[in-house]
Image: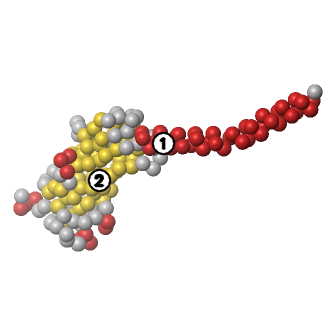
Amino acid sequence: MFKIVSLFFRSKKNIFQKSFFPILLCLTTTISFAQSSSCNAILEVEKNRNYNNTNEDGAYFKLELTNKGNSTDIYNLSAQNINASCSNNDKSSTSENVNLISSLLDSNSEPITSITVLPNQKVVFLIHLVVPQGTKFNKWNCTQINAISSNCTNYKVNTVVHTIVNNPSEN
């Protein structure tokens, strides 16, 4: 009797061991597919107006984040000067580009660091770029805006805005 019970459990163990890898592979594939279809977004400047001049209040750009995925996602937002790795609109050298101070704002002009977007919906927000005192005039700035998904590891979208710093006395 002991041999029969032992043989029965051994065969169950072998079935489990043989089936474990295909089950794990199928589960991993399913999770990867689910993540890939849930993380799909577009970040762009409204009407593709990615160029602006500064004035005494700085410069504002209206941004649109569209969630093309199939689930609600929270995107963590950030902005950074990328002067060394961009190209200026007038093809001038980026070696004299200047850094601007950025803040991200919701549609009510309140500061934000993240934004929730429902599936197949678009949310509008702003980036406000301010010229630090003492900044040289008639110089360019390139700022990259990033939206990083909370749902999918390492998924992010970004866009770049270009700003020329005008001399306020010439406006």
Q: Which residue occupies the foreground of this view, 132 or 118?
A: 118
The residue under the point 93% across, 27% down is 1
Kind of residue at disc 2: Thr
Instruction: Let me know if residue 130 appears in the view.
Output: no
| Residue 100 badge | none
Rendering colour mode? secondary structure
Badge 1: residue crowd in 10 Å (few <14, some 14–19, many ≥20): few
Q: Are marks 2 and 1 in contact (CB under 8 Å)?
A: no
Quadrant where the C terminus is found in the figure:
bottom left
Q: Position of residue 74 (x, y in %)?
A: 39, 38
Q: Is residue 155 above or below residue 86?
A: above
Q: Position of residue 143 (x, y in %)?
A: 28, 57
**SS for dot 2:** strand
Closest to the camera, between mark 2 and mark 1, is 1
Q: Which residue occupies the foreground of this view, 135 or 35?
A: 35
- Occupied quadrant, residue 142: bottom left
Q: Is residue 11 above or below residue 61?
A: above
The residue under the point 18% across, 52% down is 49
Residue furthest toward the left?
Answer: 170
Kind of residue at disc 1: Phe
Q: Which residue occupies the foreground of this view, 156 or 120?
A: 120
Q: Position of residue 136 (x, y in %)?
A: 19, 66
- Occupied quadrant, residue 160: bottom left
- How far apart marks 2 and 1 lie (CA) works out to 26 Å
Instruction: Let me know if residue 38 appears in the view.
Output: yes
Q: Position of residue 44 (x, y in %)?
A: 26, 48
The residue under the point 14% across, 57% down is 53
Query: Which residue is identified by label 1?
Result: 33
Query: Which residue is identified by label 2?
Result: 159
**Disc on the earlier residue, 2 or 1:** 1
Badge 2: residue crowd in 10 Å (few <14, some 14–19, many ≥20): some
**SS for dot 1:** helix
